[in-house]
Image (spheres, rainbow, N blue to C red):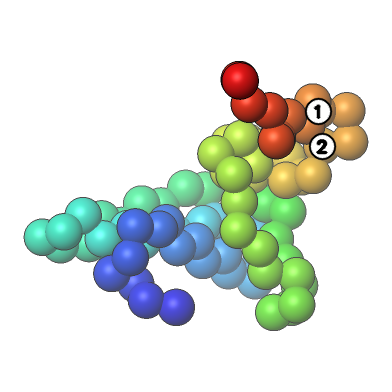
Amino acid sequence: MDPFQRALFLFCGRRRDRIKALYWEGDGFLLLYKRLESGSFQWPRNGAEVQKLSAQQYRWLMEGLSVEQPKAHRPVEGLSMK
């Protein structure tokens, strides 16, 4: 993947209580770091589980929740006005 594209790249350590984020701003990289006081991030165990996240899924991840919330409302797609 291209680190210079408009994307936030997330990296997590073995203990899964810390996340580093890398974002290209056009003139340099922005590095963010977050550590959970308790609990762990729901992180993929292998490359096959890696996925793109929506803004809502990112918020859930940063709160230490699973990115798949079974009771969350799913976005409605395919609507149009004629």
Residue 38 versus residue 47 in the image, above or below: above
Instruction: Quadrant for the C terminus, please.
Output: top right
- Horizontally, residue 24 falls left or right of residue 45, namely left
Q: What residue sits right under mark 2 in the picture?
A: 69
**Location of the N terminus (image quadrant):** bottom left
Residue type pointed to by label 1: Ala
Q: Residue furthest right?
A: 70
Give the secondary structure at mark 2: loop
Specify few, some or many for label 1: CA neighbours under 10 Å numbering under 14, 14-19, or 20 or more: few
Q: CA distance from mark 2 to mark 1?
A: 5 Å
Query: Looking at the picture, does residue 32 appear above or below residue 4?
Result: above
Residue at the image position 73 percent from the left and 54 percent from the top: 42
- Write the residue at 58% across / 69% down: 13
- Residue placed furthest toward the left: 27
- Say if mark 2 contacts mark 1, CB within 8 Å: yes
Q: What residue appears at the point 60 percent right and 58 percent down from the top-left corner?
A: 52
Q: Residue furthest top?
A: 81
Q: Please indicate, yes or no, whether residue 35 appears anywhere in the rendered image.
A: yes
> In the drawing, what numbered circle is on residue 62?
none
Instruction: List the single residue furthest toward the front.
Output: 82
Quadrant of res 12: bottom right
* Residue located beneath label 1 in the image: 72
